[in-house]
Image: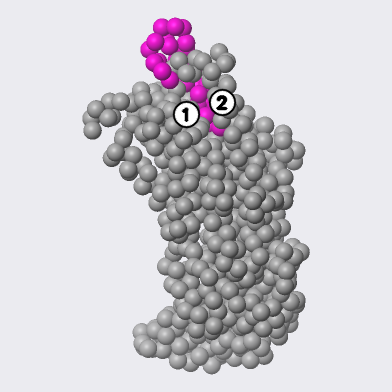
Amino acid sequence: MEILVYGTINSVALALYALGFALVYGTSRLPNFAHGALYVLSGFIAWSALNTLGLPYLASILLTLIVTAIIGAIIYQFVLIRVRGMEISEIIATYAIALAILEGLRWGGFKGMTYTLPAFIEGSTSIAGVSVDYQRLLVVIIGAAMVACLWLFTHHTRIGLALRGMAQDERAALMLGIDSDMMALVAMALGSSLAAFAAVLLMPLGNIVVESGYNVLILAISVCIVGGLGSWAGAVLAAFLIGFAQILTAVYLGSHYQMVVALLAIILTLIIKPSGLFGQQKELEERV
Amino acid sequence: MTPKYHALVAEQYDKFKYCFRIHGEAKNLVGEIFANFGELKAKYGFNNLFIIAQDVSHARGAANIIKKIAEKKGWNVTGLEIYPTGATDFSMGLLKAKNSNTEIINIWMDMPESAILLKQWYEMKIPALPFGSTLAAAEQPGFWKATGGKGEYTLCNVVNAGNAPSTATPWTMKFYNAYAERWKVEPEGLGTSSSYMAVYVLKDAIERAGSLDPDKVITALEKTDMMGVYGRLRFDPKSHQVIPSTDPKEGAVGSILQWQDGKRIVVYPKSIATGKILLPPWMNK
């Protein structure tokens, strides 16, 4: 039962880490290596809004989501738009932005263990004899709701449909009058906002530390590669596969090997099925 | 803090005679930890120990040593869980400790994420006392704020008195308060009071030597005998390690503290303790 409960929590957390990355790559083919850095940055934005500006918690969260979305849009409009389509340059540019954000935060004194966000609801309960705190339960509930909202957004709104159109065939979408650059900007803003959403939901479980930016990026990439780059459904399924594999590893082999699971998943996927579970890059299979 | 360091001074005196360590060392620190484990065993009947360590050489090595000593002393070591540096989820290790009826979780971690471990311990109401040998997060005055008070009942060893408030000597609180006033933070970690005393001890030795000649200063340092922030400071003439004691009148005293109601309460050694070890309310003993 512990494996079921904590496996589900871990899986939803992984899905939350990865959704923003999957959305940006899925629609605009931009590998946003600044995703983990935006996750950490949004944690510090929320902390500052709460502690420095003295805003109420809900207002701090809303402000964080909006500010991070704007930062994502700015990154696209002033940096990524110039290198779009040049894959190596996209990776170098986004990774450079990640380093600038994370190391800039460290340089600016945002280090140590004193930065933390409060839990939405304090306390814990028991599920079939397994003790779980309310914040973790909220992660599962809100995370599942977020996946559902994202599905509704991409299937029943004009912007969402335009994003899906881009994801399916950018040239065809252009011919239908969808502004490719505008949609990529929207995807980047939305993806950044999803990173912020994950941060405000998950960071109350721990502390806001710069180092977690690198871990989140690795986990997000791992989930997206296993699920298939560009596939949101694949990302959710992969999050559950890796999430449960991590918990089983921690229980039967030791917590020390937990991170290896994500890295091993990347290697195995690239060897066996490079396009991932639901990937659309069939040319990768053809090369193999 | 390794015992190998001062052993080297004794073994190769001519080469390492310039090295003096005014700070406590690991062997003594582990001895202090087990003195407390022994008391908890006698008082509450504790017998099950779970060890959590960080995946770095010093912590892995220390965890294995603690495991060996604990087993030798009759403790049932219910598990040894190693976490990579930067880990942010400790739930599985904590559940293992809970499921094995562990009563004490010994922690050896010097990463800031150890605060997360203790937050999770509190939120999951794990019925085992977290006792840090090296536990960086809990050694810091900001720990209470970092955990939102969920670090309550955590114990850790800050190696020397003066790194937490006590009246080990008349100098202890004088130093403590002056430091807090000057730096706007209480003495933190495990090396603050010893770094401070090192300057005074060296000044004293130079004055007694009446010279800056290295050999004369070394001879004077070997004869050091002064009361400092954490007790009587003397060096072993062969190993140049400060002589430890549980009585500040006899030697350098350590400090094990427990977080109680937002304060760092020294619970060991008894000669300087300002409180007793408390168990969390969910440990029904």
> Is residue B196 at least partly visible in the picture?
no
In this picture, residue B132 sits left or right of residue A236: right
Q: Which residue type does callout 2 highlight?
A: Leu
Q: Residue at x 45, y 58 (%)?
A: A252
Q: Which residue is mark 1?
A: A232
Report if residue B239 lies within the magenta region.
no
> Is residue A184 at least partly visible in the picture?
yes
Q: Residue at x 24, y 27 (%)?
A: A286
Marks 1 and 2 close (CB-CB < 8 Å): yes
Q: Nearer the viewer, residue B20 or A284?
A: A284
Q: Residue at x 51, y 37 (%)?
A: A15
Residue B52 sits above or below residue B113 on the image: below
Q: Nearer the viewer, residue B25 or A79?
A: B25
Residue B159 sits above or below residue B233 on the image: above
User: What crowding class fits label 1: few (fewer than 14 Cα within 10 Å), some (14-19), or many (20 or more)?
Assistant: many
Q: Quadrant of the C terminus of chain A?
A: top left
Q: Which residue type does callout 1 highlight?
A: Trp
Residue B167 place in picture, x, y as percent:
73, 80
Q: Residue at x 40, y 15 (%)?
A: A170
Q: Which residue is mark 2?
A: A150
